[in-house]
Amino acid sequence: MILNTIVSICTILTFVVIWATLREMKVQRYKIFEPQIFPTSFDLYFTSNTDKILPIDISYDSENKNKVKPNSLFLELKNIGQGTAREVLTNLNIEVDYQTLFSDVKEKLLKTGEEIDLEIGDNSCWLQSSESSRVFIGGNFPFVKKFSNKFDYLLPVNNKNESIKIELPGTIILLLSLVIVALEMMNTSEQKEYIELIEESILIIIKIYYLDNLDKAFESNYKMKITIPSIVVQSNGKASYKLSFERQRNHEVQQWQ
């Protein structure tokens, strides 16, 4: 009787171990197909030019060797999972009060004697280029706050170093460029207060939806915050303002139906 009981218990334990092993193997098989997309943090260097107010030189490195094209700034998404992400949908929400920030920076520039022809409306602003005012870019800059993008797929980085690039509105570059121009004309105490205001006033929220190769759906949410941590002096003596786009919060990737 005791022997039969021991045999029964051993049999049950064997089945439990086999079930757990098979379950673990199943999870591992699914992981092979599971992607995970996230936005990468990056730095930008804004360097003013004494010959012009705008456009300001913007680069991904402190020596201005890898320059950003005018009104062209991208967020980069990478897939650090093991599987390919399919039918990728990104929703971006830019939390910024354009009217207040543009009005504030325009007022600060006017106080320093820099006159720029900037008309601020409810949904956009208009910048007039003028050689006499040393502004060499112009046009209408809409106050974009929400937009979506769709992509067919994104391979994992361990396969190929591929990424998805999402272009941010040119209005963001214009705003940040004017902020840098204003900062250069302030004293140290004013700079600190203004930097804190800008850092608290611009936030980018990113929601990403995608499928794996087994048609399982995933959602991930991130926040990108702009910080102005330092001033970097280049080898030619010019000073650049280093702006960082930092991924602030990483919600866990969740499956959704």
Image (spheres, grey):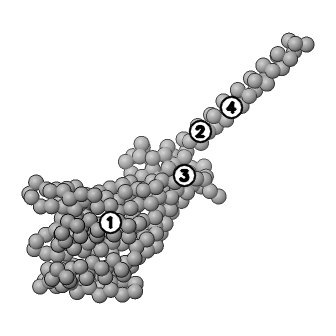
- Write the residue at 19% across / 71% down: 186
Q: Earlier in the sequence, mark 4 or mark 3?
A: 4
Three-letter code, disc 1: Glu
Q: Residues within 10 Å of mark 1 (few under 14, many from 20)?
A: few
Q: Is residue 82 above or below residue 54?
A: above
Q: Earlier in the sequence, mark 3 or mark 2?
A: 2
Residue contact at pointers 1 and 4, CB within 8 angstroms: no
Q: Is residue 192 above or below residue 139?
A: above
Q: Which mark is residue 196?
A: 1
Q: Secondary structure at mark 2?
A: helix
Question: Is residue 15 found left or right of 175 in the rendered image?
Answer: right
Spatial CA span between label 4 and label 2: 14 Å
Q: Residues within 10 Å of mark 3 (few under 14, many from 20)?
A: some
Q: Secondary structure at mark 3?
A: loop
- Write the residue at 29% across / 61% down: 228
- Mark nearest the camera among 1 and 4 is 1
In the picture, the quarter occupied by the N terminus is top right
Q: Residues within 10 Å of mark 4 (few under 14, many from 20)?
A: few
Three-letter code, disc 3: Val
Residue contact at pointers 3 and 2, CB within 8 angstroms: no
Q: Is residue 6 above or below residue 112?
A: above
Question: Which residue is labeled 4 in the image?
Answer: 20
Question: Which residue is labeled 3 in the image?
Answer: 253
Q: Earlier in the sequence, mark 3 or mark 1?
A: 1
Q: Secondary structure at mark 1?
A: helix
Question: Which residue is labeled 2 in the image?
Answer: 29
- Write the residue at 29% across / 87% down: 119
Three-letter code, disc 2: Arg
Tell me if residue 20 can be seen: yes
Q: Residues within 10 Å of mark 2 (few under 14, many from 20)?
A: few
Where residue 195 sits, quadrant-wise, is bottom left
